[in-house]
Amino acid sequence: MLLRTAHQLTVENDGIVDTIALTGGTSRAHVIREICSHLEPYQVGEKPITGETVIAKDLTIDSLAIMDMVMELEDRFDVSIPMSVIAEIHTVDQLADTIQDLRAARG
């Protein structure tokens, strides 16, 4: 008998399509959900927070709250985002990509 297993799974949830490597890693969609959860208190009206949301412009969040959120995400995902990199992050997608890249780099 031959048993085949999937090594990747493609998932679509809330309009976010993500490929999850089934090796115990954290999916990009999960990272985005975590970021959005932290940003919900700063949401403007009914406009949803998406990957394209510009954190400092589209939300009612100040720089101190952004730094607090980044520190919480660093703890949650066991990464350290250098200050020079944080300064270049503008959107939810960019923050999620940075977290995913740092997680992948530590292997």
Image: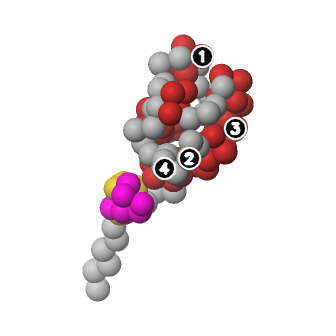
Question: What is the C-alpha distance between the residues marked 3 and 1?
Answer: 15 Å
Q: Which labelled disc corresponds to residue 48?
A: 4
- Secondary structure, mark 1, is helix
Tell me whether circle 2 and circle 4 mark residues in contact (CB < 8 Å): no
- Secondary structure, mark 2, is loop
Amino acid tagged 1 = Met
- Location of mark 3 (residue): 72
Give the percent coordinates (x, y) of residue 46: 52, 51
Instruction: Name the foreground residue: 47 vs 101.
Output: 47
Rendered residue at 40%/38% (across/down): 52
User: Which is nearer the N-term, disc 3 or disc 1?
Assistant: 3
Marks 4, 3: nearer the viewer: 4
Marks 3, 2: nearer the viewer: 2
Mark 4 is surrounded, within 10 Å at the Cα level, by few (under 14), some (14 to 19) or many (20 or more) other residues, namely few
Q: Quadrant of the N terminus?
A: bottom left
- Residue 93 quadrant: top left
- Secondary structure, mark 4, is loop
Rendered residue at 45%/37% (across/down): 53
User: Which is nearer the N-term, disc 1 or disc 4?
Assistant: 4
Q: Is residue 1 above or below residue 21?
A: below
